[in-house]
Amino acid sequence: MTPFTEKAIRIIQSIPEGKVMTYGGVAAAAGSSRGARQVVRILHSMSRSHKLPWHRIINAQGRISLADGESGEIQRLYLMGEGVEFDEQGAVDLKRFGYDPGPLD
């Protein structure tokens, strides 16, 4: 596992209930500001084995990116169950619900 992948996993695991991060935010915090697609790959291939709270990752516009309607709706329900609110356009206020992991050890 690469150092970037290890850091990204730790960051995703640290996101508390009721908070979200963007794919790019996770990538930047893990040391690669251009690694958002790598974060997608990590979520797709490692969420189950590392028990990642995949539903807490959204796009830079504060929206759910999953194209599959059912998966996107599940993500929305999980987030709403944690108290995350969506506006009329289906976006999350990243200033209010965004999470900053701070410096990694």
Image (cartoon, helix red, strand yellow):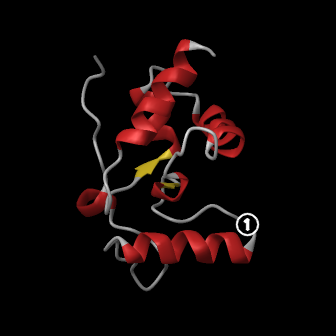
Query: Relative to 95, does residue 47 appear above or below in the rendering?
Result: above
Q: Residues within 10 Å of mark 1 (few under 14, many from 20)?
A: few
Q: Quadrant of residue 100?
A: top left
13 or 23: which is nearer to us? 13
104 or 87: which is nearer to us? 104
What residue do we see at 40% from left, 34% from top? Answer: 11
Query: In x, y percent, where is residue 71?
Result: 68, 70
**Which amino acid lies under the numbered mark 1 shown in the image of this protein?**
Ala
Residue designated by label 1: 67
Q: Residue furthest bottom?
A: 88
What residue do we see at 57% from left, 24% from top? Answer: 5
Query: In x, y percent, where is residue 65?
Result: 62, 61
Query: In x, y percent, where is residue 75?
Result: 55, 68
Instruction: Please give left or right for residue 101 compared with residue 54 in the image.
Output: left
What residue do we see at 35% from left, 76% from top? Answer: 85
Query: Relative to 25, does residue 20 appear above or below in the rendering?
Result: below
Q: Quadrant of residue 38?
A: top right
What residue do we see at 65% from left, 38% from top? Answer: 46
Quadrant of the image for the N terminus? top right
